[in-house]
Amino acid sequence: MADFVIAPPEQVAVPVAGGGVFPVRRIFCVGRNYAAHAREMGSDPNREPPFFFTKPADALVPGGQDTPYPSVTANLHHEMELVVAIGQGGADVSPGDALALVFGYAAGLDLTRRDLQDEAKATHRPWDMSKGFDASAPIGEIVPAAQAGHPAEGAITLKVNGQIRQSGDLSDQIWPVPDVIATLSKLVRLAPGDLIFTGTPDGVGMLNRGDILEGAIAGVGVVRTRIV
Ligand code: MN
């Protein structure tokens, strides 16, 4: 046991469907991965390579807990996403080998301070404080690929207060999961415990305190939270 001079941080973990918990190391997120969402954000959805940003592991909100409305924003947005849980590490992985790294999948929300992100884009500054704030990543249970397989198509939807806000299909991803993993593994060595949020379909929009979010991905599961 190391001679820690303060208490070490608690290990962040996400419940796994069927039992156990998945220990989280890092969170990577794909910037734009559905053509209709790229268009609604004002960019051209050609197949330029995926780009990535990160959130700290302790930004996760697992287990259907409430999500506190963040400070320093007046425009909190929802982005409903398929999350990949990496079970085996690897660098410079080919798309053909990429799925062997996957432990499982979850439904997640990439919450965004859209006003701060718009300002960061306009001033060519980093996105960290618009994306990587506390409680910015609600996530549902992880379903092992051993049970769910590797979903490449199927509905991805988000309801807010019972009304559909986002409705897409995993097959609309510009970069499917194997390409996302292959590209990311050229930038960093992926490690067991890493999560990858794979981008959102169109329909992103504003959230308010009291909103109840229920996201679902066919064959994967649900993510639920309430903004408080
Ligand atoms: Mn996103």
Image (tube, rainbow, N blue to C red):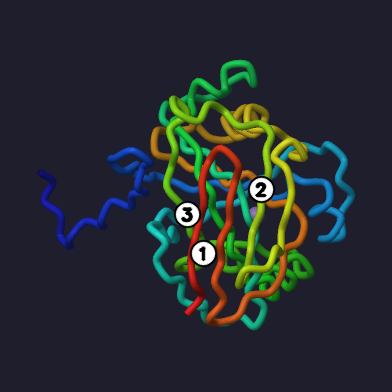
Q: Position of residue 17 (x, y in %)?
A: 38, 41
Q: Is residue 192 left or right of residue 2?
A: right
Q: Is residue 135 left or right of residue 120?
A: left
Image mark for residue 136: 1
Nearest to the observer: residue 12 or residue 5: 12
Image mark for residue 139: 3
The relative height of residue 45 versus residue 167 in the rendered view (above or below) is above
Ligand 1 lies in quarter = bottom right
Is the residue indicated by label 1 positioned so its CB lies within 8 Å of ligand 1?
no
Residue picked out by circle 2: 156
Q: Nearer the viewer, mark 1 or mark 3?
A: 3
Kind of residue indicated by mark 1 = Ser
Image mark for residue 24: none
Q: Residue at x 81, y 60 (%)?
A: 41
- Per the image, label 2 sits on a secondary structure element best described as strand
If you read the primary sequence from the N terminus, does the residue marked by circle 2 or circle 3 appear first? 3
Kind of residue indicated by mark 2 = Ile
Q: Nearer the viewer, mark 1 or mark 2?
A: 2
- Per the image, label 3 sits on a secondary structure element best described as strand
Q: Residue at x 37, y 49 (%)?
A: 14
Q: CA distance from mark 2 to mark 3?
A: 14 Å
Nearest to the observer: residue 33 or residue 218: 218
Q: Residues at badges 2 and 3 in contact (C-beta under 8 Å)?
A: no
- Per the image, label 1 sits on a secondary structure element best described as loop
Crowding near pointer 2: few (<14 within 10 Å), some, many (20+)? many
Q: CA distance from mark 1 to mark 2?
A: 19 Å
Crowding near pointer 3: few (<14 within 10 Å), some, many (20+)? many
Q: Residue at x 63, y 63 (%)?
A: 159
Nearest to the observer: residue 75 or residue 172: 172
